[in-house]
Amino acid sequence: MGNNIKIHQHSQNLCDFPGIRKLVTNELKNPAESPTLHVFPELFLCGYPVQDLCLQNSFIDEYLSHLELLNQAFLGAPKSEDLYLLGGLAYEFSKTGIPSSIENVIWLGKPGQKLEKIYSKMQLPNYDIFDERKYFTPGKKSATIHWQGNQIGLLICEDMWPSVHYSKNPLDLLSEEKEPFDLIVNMSASPYNVRKLASRKARARTTSHLLKAPLVYVNLVAEEDEILFDGASFVLNGDDEIYQAAQFAPETKVISFEDIKRKRYQTITLNLQHSWEDLFAPQLTTGKEPRLLPLEDTDHEELIQALTFGIQEYARKNGFQHFLVALSGGIDSALTLALLKLSLKEGQTIEALYMPSQYSATESYDYSEELCKNLEIPLKNVSIKFLHSMVRNTFHMNFSEDFEGIADENIQSRLRGALLMARSNQTGRMVINTSNKSEIAVGYSTLYGDSVGAVSLIGDLYKTEVFSLAHYLNETRNGLIPQGIIDRKPSAELRENQFDTDSLPPYPILDTILECLLSYRYSKDDLVKMKLPEEDINKTLKLYTGSEYKRRQFCPIIKVKTKSFGFGYRVPINKDNKFYFN
Amino acid sequence: MGNNIKIHQHSQNLCDFPGIRKLVTNELKNPAESPTLHVFPELFLCGYPVQDLCLQNSFIDEYLSHLELLNQAFLGAPKSEDLYLLGGLAYEFSKTGIPSSIENVIWLGKPGQKLEKIYSKMQLPNYDIFDERKYFTPGKKSATIHWQGNQIGLLICEDMWPSVHYSKNPLDLLSEEKEPFDLIVNMSASPYNVRKLASRKARARTTSHLLKAPLVYVNLVAEEDEILFDGASFVLNGDDEIYQAAQFAPETKVISFEDIKRKRYQTITLNLQHSWEDLFAPQLTTGKEPRLLPLEDTDHEELIQALTFGIQEYARKNGFQHFLVALSGGIDSALTLALLKLSLKEGQTIEALYMPSQYSATESYDYSEELCKNLEIPLKNVSIKFLHSMVRNTFHMNFSEDFEGIADENIQSRLRGALLMARSNQTGRMVINTSNKSEIAVGYSTLYGDSVGAVSLIGDLYKTEVFSLAHYLNETRNGLIPQGIIDRKPSAELRENQFDTDSLPPYPILDTILECLLSYRYSKDDLVKMKLPEEDINKTLKLYTGSEYKRRQFCPIIKVKTKSFGFGYRVPINKDNKFYFN
């Protein structure tokens, strides 16, 4: 009877200590016949990211009790050869009782013994959405364990991505070990972005060759505010792929040590990355012409999975079962509604609200109706015409200034926002925002108007990607979205004959500029060198730099890209610093 | 003729490279007769905090040109014995042209020579609002310079606050120097909070005794989004205070070396802080019963200075000259309006908007009118009654559900928000939000309703502090705020006979709970031990933990406390993690 590895790709709520404990104690009570190495994700014992909560007394008290209860469970468990690798926190306190050190560690569990802190994460990422140096103290030593005659090297997530920015590098330290490794374990809480799995695997393959051993990678499945953790755990051995877990779904899997014996590996020299950017935005380092990569079919499928998972988890964690979407007759709200419909679980419902003003084309209603018919979603039609004209009258009566232009455009959007939120308050439905990344980037939306919502579903997709995903949905899901919606010229319908292209560059150009700006950190000079039209560049830069204040008050956006607006995007609002873009 | 120190407490816009250069070149062109050591604040050459901008090609290109132009200016400057200490950035690049290291440094300037990087900040704060480890690489060596026979030790801001969390500690390294110091220079960009100056000075005194030399502390004056930098530079020598610069205003000052000769100092042993919290929230380590410190007269004056400075800088940097405030007849909007009026500069105007619904008391208008008379601000009265009833009718016509309760309360607030923004769009006035910290903490406001605005002026003051400051304003500024507003029972006036105390604990209790929760990180158990009413604790915790989503979409709040909502407050929105508070 050989030894096994059990991969625990679980999905627990942040701080759900009882639920987390139950999973572990169930395993402890029911040991398998074969000795099993149980591998759980990074920070499994509390969830990730806990942010400031890890400094709050209530969290600390609960977490320490939780650890103590786990100790009792291990002490009282039936003896076995099993071994548990559990990601969690380890606290030290100063004399005043305040945490003097918090480490992101691996707790080693043996039935009959208390938990033992065996390894502390050495490389604490602190770029983009990561704030680990804000909370955690880095470890200083690599860790190797011996189990059932196997030598096993331990890593936590970022430890596999060596950079000159970390003072110690666990891969170097592990490769100095004299005894060969039989297994490398990487316990991760690795945020999702489209195409990330391929880069994780490439890095894991390199690590496997470097340390000359098979590698088990176990990742969390979760949605925390805007960040997704996609699971997609795997086992590989040099270039051989042994196992691939599901993406965006919990999964446990037992693998035999027999199936992943050491083999011949390539000789690899370790390359340290020289910048954070190399790590989180590998596109920057390719030296290739920057561009907005077109979405492939596999990307489309992955995005559908990611977004439907994300929106459902967001709803569940905030206690919502029912949804509300404002339809405009345009592509963004149509795609939002279609994706939401695809995500729907038993007992859940969606309501669509169409709120025409005097500028709304009749097709806008017709398309919305057709869409809702396709999707079997009830559509309510609530005109804002009278409200709009009453506001106009109120202003004419009370103020001497004309009420027109941007004031008149925005009030329509804001009245819609107010009605939508009122309907949400009336029904308890969660409002799903319908903005796309291009709009958010150039501020082509009304603050407190079409920007309202609990969460943005497609806010990390550029407009061209919205089209691309809509096409794909129609091809693969029986034409959910009326072709007319896809074909019509985008318009905000806030004045006569208004079209997006009146204010914005054509979307393919706009999106290319934005992608270069955000993901490649391009300057105006760089963009000009790409031979993009200078007028479009200037227009985009002006709109982009002038709309930070809108982004600051925007709702959370489900993150599916390396560089997204939201928590990992930290740019001053004040405009005084923008001259250098122009 | 002796040697002088010139303290440059300047106020430049972030990235205003030409303006920054002009200041330096003016000094270079007009050297004083006596040899002068010019000391500028931390990151003076670009401003602070630049956040992600320091990774953007446009910023990097401009900044490098700026440095090169400065080099030319120094090379071409008339020879003198002067020395310049300039805070700035130093870049290194990887082969792909991406920054591999950015340091927060002191550039040493000598007329006739190029700038030389003399010191790199060793202690990079990364807690609360600080993200320096996200961008910067820490220095590894302390720095001492020799000038005109003087030995001078260099520090940048946080370097003066030694903690076990930094791998190297410059104070220890400097105290190992054999030759005695004639001067210690600390160049800072230190964010303001009320009573911070005293703690800076206490730390500077300790440092002066420890390193046995006088100390010059030069701080920035600026407002960057929500963060204020208050200047208030100083020179001290052990316990003697030699010079104190203005707070919230630029100031330059020449001090003679003669006036700050070395003296006898106390023998000090260096105490390393053991947690981040010790550094940024010293109240946590006093061991005293936590409490909300009452505001003293000096605190009131300082807060008036801070808030009027902050709002004016925010407006200037975002291109606004005129303001718009919604009055409710309550204390928060009254204090906001009064403070704004005090801040007003020539050519600027304020307009007040009163938007009654059917639930607004007649006193609310009377008080608003009296307030505006006192402040000489035009008041516009725009009723939302008809709009409100039209929305009610619309809902009755279109939906079968009753329109009442929270839906009916919120729509009033949101209609006000929409009208206020429409008036802002119509007039180009900046909307100043009127929420206080207690409301923001418990979500006692309507998202997209009374929460709208470009920036919040009093959002870092608890309700009891709002009262305290209003009292103080009336005592010292001829009763600006009608006593009736201060005396009346706080109400949102969104339904008949609604008072804040229907939903919230009495404000003195609420504010104490909130302060313990936020600034002392107290748990429910801790609060119960303080003998606060358990019902009030439960109510507060439930409201507080349930309103993260509102805070996430709130406008920037001018920060005047150690712990504020906003950029330095990082707590998940998802509610699944909140059980442990209850």
Image: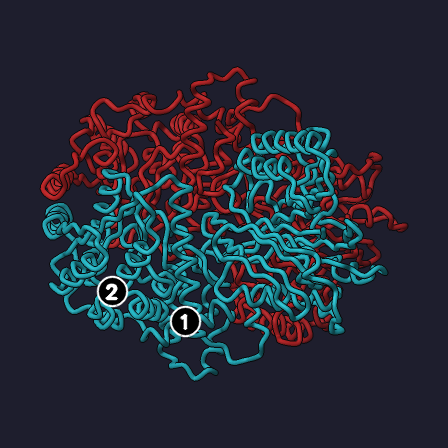
Chain colours: A red, B cyan
Give the left or right position of residue A319, taking residue B99 as reference.
left
Q: Are marks 2 and 1 in contact (CB under 8 Å)?
A: no
Looking at the picture, tell me which residue is in the foreground, B220 or A384.
Answer: B220
Q: Residue at x 73, y 33 (%)?
A: B112
**Compared with residue A284, is residue B438 higher up or lower down, i.e. above or below?**
below
Vertical position of residue A286 compared to residue A338: above or below:
above
Q: Position of residue B67 (x, y in %)?
A: 65, 33
Give me the C-alpha separation between circle 2 and circle 1.
18 Å
Residue position for label 2:
B481
Which of the image's four quarters has the N terminus of chain A?
bottom right
**Residue shown at 23% from the left, 48% from the top:** B351
Residue A406: x %, y % from top left: 25, 33
Q: Dot 1, crowdedness within 10 Å: few (<14), some or many (≥20)?
A: few
Say which of A190 and B487 sits in front: B487
Q: Is residue A86 above or below residue A483?
A: below
B263 to the left or right of A26:
right
Which type of secondary structure does the marked residue at label 1 adopt? helix
Q: Is residue A426 visible?
A: no
- State which chain disc 2 sits on: B
Disc 2 marks a residue whose amino acid type is Ile
Reading the chain from its start, which is encountered first: label 2 or label 1? 1
Residue A211 locus on image (x, y percent): 81, 44
Along the line of sight, which residue is nearer the eye, B55 or A15?
A: B55
Can see residue B68?
yes
For disc 1, the marked residue is B297
Q: Is residue A87 left or right of residue A547?
A: right
Q: Give the amino acid at mark 1.
A: Asp
Residue B234 image-quadrant placement: bottom right
Is B94 rendered above or below residue A170? above
How would you rate the neighbour count of disc 2 (Cα within 10 Å): few for under 14, some for 14-19, many for 20 or more?
Answer: many
Instruction: Label 2: state its secondary structure.
Output: loop
Residue placed farthest to the right in the image?
A: A178
